[in-house]
Amino acid sequence: AQSVTQPDIHITVSEGASLELRCNYSYGATPYLFWYVQSPGQGLQLLLKYFSGDTLVQGIKGFEAEFKRSQSSFNLRKPSVHWSDAAEYFCAVSGGSYIPTFGRGTSLIVHP
Amino acid sequence: ETGVTQSPTHLIKTRGQQVTLRCSSQSGHNTVSWYQQALGQGPQFIFQYYREEENGRGNFPPRFSGLQFPNYSSELNVNALELDDSALYLCASSSKTGGAGEKLFFGSGTQLSVL
């Protein structure tokens, strides 16, 4: 079975500061990993995904994530946060079933 | 290209009633998935339809059922509503090409409140 843990329920950063959101996954083989963002009242939008190859993945809106097999992690990073980045962020994993399992999410709060 | 649209956006029902939620997939997509997102939680997979056939189901009881139509639009039906069914219901479409990890395109959801 596949699962995702996002250990941080809330993260607060100041605008312009760097950001790292943590994600740990459980899956027996090489996983397919995703980060989605959800703004209030909206559906989820894909930020980036990892299948194979380069372990550092670039996404939209200046986000990147690094796959670390030894740590079963796929942390999301951004060097400088903007106020518009305030949202809920979900990490997801999928494997042979092709159906992603989502974490419970991390709420990002951005202070001016 | 058109995005994924869901209707209605909000709905209030009472316990024991039945509800139908609708989803129009993104143009060119033949797969639709439904998710339930309770407050403060991540989306939980309900089921997926591919070319009008159920193609996978999560841990939800049979009173959650669905349909996919020839134009790839979809419905989620919930019978005998319970208070715990109150949640945001998300529809996501994708183009199943046979590869894992396909990108999902989500609608904005239907917020269901059961009183």
Image: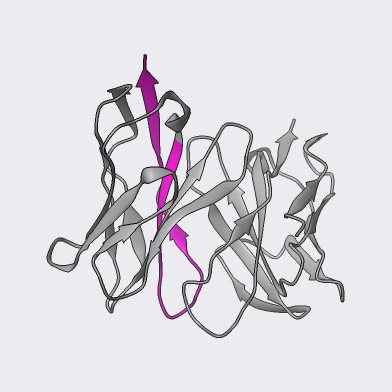
Counting labels gives 0
The spot of residue A40 in percent (x, y) is 58, 31
Question: Which residue is found at the position 75% from the left and 64% from the top?
Answer: B65
- Location of residue B34 by image quarter: bottom right
The spot of residue B87 in percent (x, y) is 64, 40
Question: Which residue is found at the position 67% from the left and 38% from the top?
Answer: B83
Q: Nearer the viewer, residue B64 or A77?
A: A77
Q: Is residue B102 above or below residue A108?
A: below
Which residue is at the far bottom?
B98
The spot of residue A23 in percent (x, y) is 28, 51
In what quadrant of the picture does the C terminus of chain B appear? Answer: top right
In what quadrant of the picture does the N terminus of chain B appear? Answer: bottom right
Which residue is at the far right?
B70
Which residue is at the far left?
A70
Question: Which residue is found at the position 52% from the left and 71% from the top?
Answer: B102
Q: Nearer the viewer, residue A41 or B76?
A: A41
The spot of residue A22 in percent (x, y) is 26, 46
Q: Give the colour scheme shown.
A: one colour
Q: Is residue A34 above or below residue A21?
A: below
- Location of residue B22 by image quarter: bottom right
Characterize the magenta stretch by its predominant secondary structure.
Answer: strand
Residue A100 lies in the magenta stretch: yes
Q: Is residue A109 above or below residue A20?
A: above
Question: Which residue is found at the position 40% from the left and 62% from the top?
Answer: A49
Residue A91 lies in the magenta stretch: yes
Q: Nearer the viewer, residue B73 or B18?
A: B73
- Location of residue A101 by image quarter: bottom left
Q: Give, as a single range, the part of the protein colored magenta.
A: A88-112
